Amino acid sequence: MMQTAGRVCPLAYRYGAAALAGAPERVVDTLYVVGGLYGNLPALARVSALFAAEGGSAALCFNGDFNWFNVDDASFVAINAAVLASDAIVGNVEAELGAPEAGAGCGCAYPESVDDAVVERSNRIHALLQATATRHPAIVGRLAKLPMFARYRVGETAVGVVHGDADSLAGWRFAAAALDDAGNRQWIDEAFATAAVDVFASTHTCLPALRSFGGGRRPRIVINNGAAGMPNFAGEPDGLLTRIALSPSPHPTLYGLRAAGLHVDALPIAFDSGRWQEQFLANWPPGSAAWLSYFERIRNGPPFRRQQAMPPGSEPLA
């Protein structure tokens, strides 16, 4: 059966967890992982301010889908200039800008649980972004050279940064529901072992999650920041980023884990939501594809609660 564009996971996206084991490793004291910025300039400004307050050896890594709503030339250039000045890996949005796969659409590889209308609108959003990208070939060329994953060491802890999951750029096995699925547990255990990492940091699914698997001296943690550029919880306007560090955060955190001397936290990105809505509506007026799919979330958050993202049995840190 032929799959609909937007539900396809191109073969080129499938790197396999073993590829992470051999990736070059950058050693830092603090790692920020920012996924799903979605072209939100006010969120980018807030991320920059948060990161600037960190001391010691620190890295800021954008793990894909930093483009999406930024279909005007000025914000397309501004987002990519800032991201490409930091560490970055490609998301499906960027992968489909440089070398689009036939039939991939937006490259999201949406599961069947996502409505067909949402998938179709995502393909239309990406087509408009693609049109903007063609006017900036130098940027597209740089995006095409980005890796699909990155590896860091924070203290004694190995961290694999991915966009989707341990095997694929557009994988969904680090979504909250998948992390809680007993049928997925063997794959998760094997992913840690094969990638030779203690922590996976991901995004892609647009909803956050933090889970710990097993005990012992070394952590085995998956943290998905959901979206840096959109609200992640009902009634809460902030984006989220992942902070993995040897020291406590100098900023407020929403929830987190402490393991093997490591702080693994979700930090709120308190961007100017009024300014962001104005910028969004300038590109995506009422009735447009992105407005229909996302504006209610941008105003009020998704139907998702903070407790669904947090480790079972834990309490909010803020």
Image: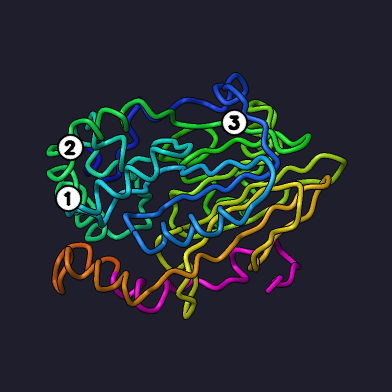
Residue segment shown in magenta:
295-318
- Label pair 1/3, CB-CB below 8 angstroms: no
Identified at 20% across, 36% down, the residue is: 103
Residue 249: image x %, image y %? 69, 59
- Residue 100 tag number: none
Q: Earlier in the sequence, mark 3 or mark 2?
A: 2
Q: Is residue 302 above or below residue 25?
A: below
Q: Is residue 50 above or below residue 168?
A: below
Quadrant where the image shows the N terminus? top left
Q: Is residue 117 above or below residue 144?
A: below
Give the camera-side residue of 48 and 177: 48
Identified at 31% across, 55% down, the residue is: 39
Number of residues whose C-alpha sits closer than 10 Å to that of mark 2, classed few (under 14), some (14–19) or many (20 or more): few
Residue type marked 1: Asp
The colouring scheme, among rainbow, by chain, secondary structure or one colour, is rainbow
- Label pair 2/1, CB-CB below 8 angstroms: yes
Quadrant where the image shows the C terminus? bottom right
Is-magenta flag for residue 303? yes
Look at mark 2 in the image and give the residue it sits on.
Answer: 136
Residue type marked 3: Arg
